[in-house]
Image (tube, rainbow, N blue to C red):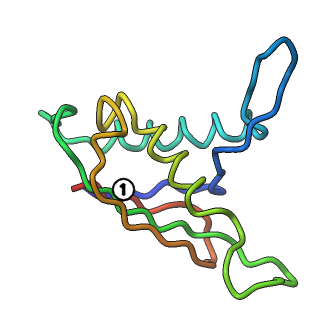
Amino acid sequence: MRFIVLGTPITQGSMKSIGRGRMIHQNSKKLNVWRDAIAAEFDRKKPDGWDTTREYELMCTFHMKRPKKPAHSYPVKDLDKLIRACMDALTEHAWEDDNQVTNIIASKLYAEEEGVEIIIN
């Protein structure tokens, strides 16, 4: 299955304390919108009879806009944190738990239009 989600890819991983031992993701508002967009597009494209109980392979290609004065020839967002956001977004949609993903291929690149291409096998 292949689908594309347009928008700025948001990383997941860094946490901040909001007091009394409670933690949230640093960019939780943007992250929630991004994860919801991924889940919604998957649900829209999901074929009938999709099995959420088996193992899966995941391929993600993240497309990001090049800054006007890039410091590097590659996007500087952490690839593992971009993947984590996608995997968590797809939990309870594509699979029951992201531990069912047995293989991941991922890349990030500069592009005219931001988003992510996701392939699930």
Farthest residue to the top: give it.
20
Residue beneath the point at 42% across and 43% down: 41
Residue beneath the point at 85% across and 81% down: 68
Q: Position of residue 77 (x, y in %)?
A: 69, 64
Residue beneath the point at 65% across and 69% down: 64
Residue beneath the point at 44% across and 44% down: 87
**Placement of 48 over or under 76, stated as above or below:** above
Of the 4 image quadrants, the one containing the N terminus is: bottom left
Q: Position of residue 47 (x, y in %)?
A: 19, 41
Q: Which residue is mark 1?
A: 3
**Placement of 103 over or under 16, stated as above or below:** below
Q: Position of residue 103 (x, y in %)?
A: 30, 59
User: In the displayed structure, does residue 112 sit left or right of residue 121?
Assistant: right
Farthest residue to the left: give it.
49
Farthest residue to the front: give it.
21
| Label 1 CA crowd tier, 10 Å (few <14, some 14–19, many 20+) | some
User: In the displayed structure, does residue 10 sit left or right of residue 88?
Assistant: right
Of the 4 image quadrants, the one containing the C terminus is: bottom left
Count of numbered labels shown in the rendering: 1
84 or 7: nearer the eye?
A: 84
1 or 56: nearer the eye?
A: 56
Going by the numbered disc 1, the residue's amino acid type is Phe
User: In the displayed structure, does residue 14 sit left or right of residue 52?
Assistant: right
User: In the displayed structure, does residue 60 sit left or right of residue 35?
Assistant: left
* SS at badge 1: strand
Q: Position of residue 84 (x, y in %)?
A: 52, 47
**Placement of 8 over or under 38, stated as above or below:** below
